[in-house]
Image: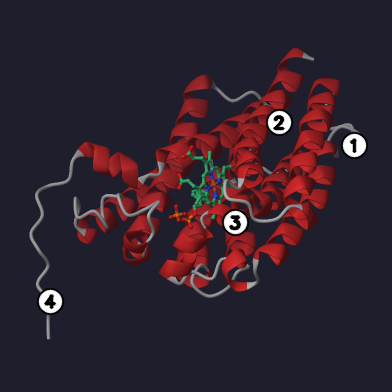
Amino acid sequence: MTTATPLLPPADWRDFLALTKPRVMTLVVFTGLCGMLAAPVQIAPVLGFTAILCIALGAGAAGALNQWYEADIDAVMKRTAGRPLPAGRMDRQSALHFGVGLSAFSVILMGLAVNLAAAAILTVSILFYVLVYTVWLKRRTPQNIVIGGAAGAFPPLIGWAAATGEVALLPVLLFSLVFLWTPPHFWALALFVKTDYANAGVPMLPVVAGEKATRRQIGLYTVPMAIVAVAPWPLGLTGAIYGVTALATTAVFAILAALVAAGRTTPTMAREKQLFSYSILYLFVIFGALVADRWWA
Ligand code: HEM
Ligand SMILES: CC(C)=CCC/C(C)=C/CC/C(C)=C/COP(=O)(O)OP(=O)(O)O
C-alpha cells in the first residue's frame, strides 16, 4: 500500500533558513572563525571569508539533513514541533535536496578555494553529525551526544586548517575543549526537557539512566573540560589574556556544574537552565579571548 504525500505549497526562504538551525550554528561558526584567527598564519581576507562561509553552509546543510531524517521525532517534541517539516510547511524531498546540495557545495568550494585539509575536516564533520550522530547513535544510546558530539567540535580545527593547511596542538586542544564541553552543555538542557525526549522515545541520559546519574556525569565531564580549557596557557600556546579569562570563566562553569551535580529536581530547574545558558556564553567568551590574546597581546 502506498501513502499519498500531500501536496504542499513551495516553502518560504525562512523555512529553508530554519532548516539550518541558525542560532546553534552561530556558535559553531564563531569557534571556526576563532580557530582561524588564532592560527600563526594570516589568511588572505577573501579566503578567510570563504572558509567561514563554507563552515556556515556546511553546518547549516548538516542541520537540514538532521531535520530531514528526524521529522518524525521532531513532530512529537514540543520544542521542535514547529519546525518546517513537522509543521507541514515543507516536503521532505526539498529538505533532502537542500541539505545534500548545500553539503556538496560547501565542501567543493572549501576544497577549490581554500585547501584540501579544511575541506576534508568539513566533510568529516558533516558526515559525523548526519550519519554517526543523527542516523546511527541518537536513537540507540545515551552516549549519542558524547560520540556524535565530536561533530560540533571540528570547526576550530577547520578554521585553523584553512589558515595553515595543517593541524597542530592548539587546535586539537580546542577540539577537545568543545568535545568535553558538549556533555555538560547538552545534559543540563536534557534535564529540563527530559519529558520531551521520553515522549519521543529518544534515549537521552536522563531518560535512560535517570537524573542522578546525569548530574554526576555533568560533574565528571566538567573536570577534564576545565583542564583542557586552561592547558594552552601553561603549555605556552597562549598568553595571559587567554589564560586569565580561561581561569575565571572556567571557575564559574565549574561552580555552576557542581551546583547542578549536587542539586535535585525543582519546579523551575533554575540551576540547570543557568548552566545551559552559561555554557553558551562561556564558549563565546573563551574563544573570543583566544583571538584577543593572539592579536592584542
Ligand atoms: C551533540 C551535541 C549537541 C547537542 C545534542 C546539542 C543540543 C542542543 C539543543 C537541543 C539545544 C536547544 C535549542 C535549539 O534547538 O535551538 C541547543 C542549543 C544551543 N546549542 Fe547545542 N548541542 C550540541 C552541541 C553544540 C555545539 C558543539 C555548539 C557550538 C559550538 C552548540 C551551540 C548551541 C547554541 C548556541 C545553542 C542556543 C541556541 C538558541 O539560542 O536557541 N551546541 N543545543
Ligand atoms: C559541519 C559542521 C561543522 C557541523 C556541526 C554540526 C553540529 C554538530 C552542531 C552542533 C550540534 C547540534 C546542533 C546538536 C543538536 O542536537 P539535535 O540534532 O539532537 O537537536 P534537535 O533535537 O534540536 O534536533
Q: For label 4, count other residues whose C-alpha is less than 10 Å away and answer few (under 14), some (14-19) or many (20+).
A: few
Q: Residue visible at 21% across and 60% down?
A: 93
Query: Separation of disc 3 and disc 4 at Cα?
Result: 37 Å
State whether residue 232 is above or below residue 72: above
Which circle marks residue 120 in the picture? none
Which circle marks residue 3 in the picture? 4
What x and y, as percent, mark residue 216?
76, 60
Look at the numbered disc 2 and give the secondary structure of its residue: helix
Q: Residue visible at 12% across and 81% down?
A: 2
What x and y, as percent, mark residue 91?
19, 57
Which circle marks residue 191 in the picture? 3
Q: Nearer the viewer, residue 124 or 254?
A: 254
Q: Quadrant of residue 211?
A: bottom right
Query: Separation of disc 2 and disc 3 at Cα?
Result: 25 Å
Q: Is the residue indicated by label 3 positioned so its CB lies within 8 Å of ligand 1?
A: no
Residue 5 shown left or right of residue 104 in the figure: left
Residue tagged by mark 1? Answer: 235
Q: Are marks 3 and 4 in contact (CB under 8 Å)?
A: no
Amino acid at dot 3: Leu
- Which one is closest to the eye, mark 3 or mark 1? 3
Look at the numbered disc 3 and give the secondary structure of its residue: helix
From this viewpoint, is residue 39 visible? Answer: no
Residue 25 shown left or right of residue 91 in the figure: right
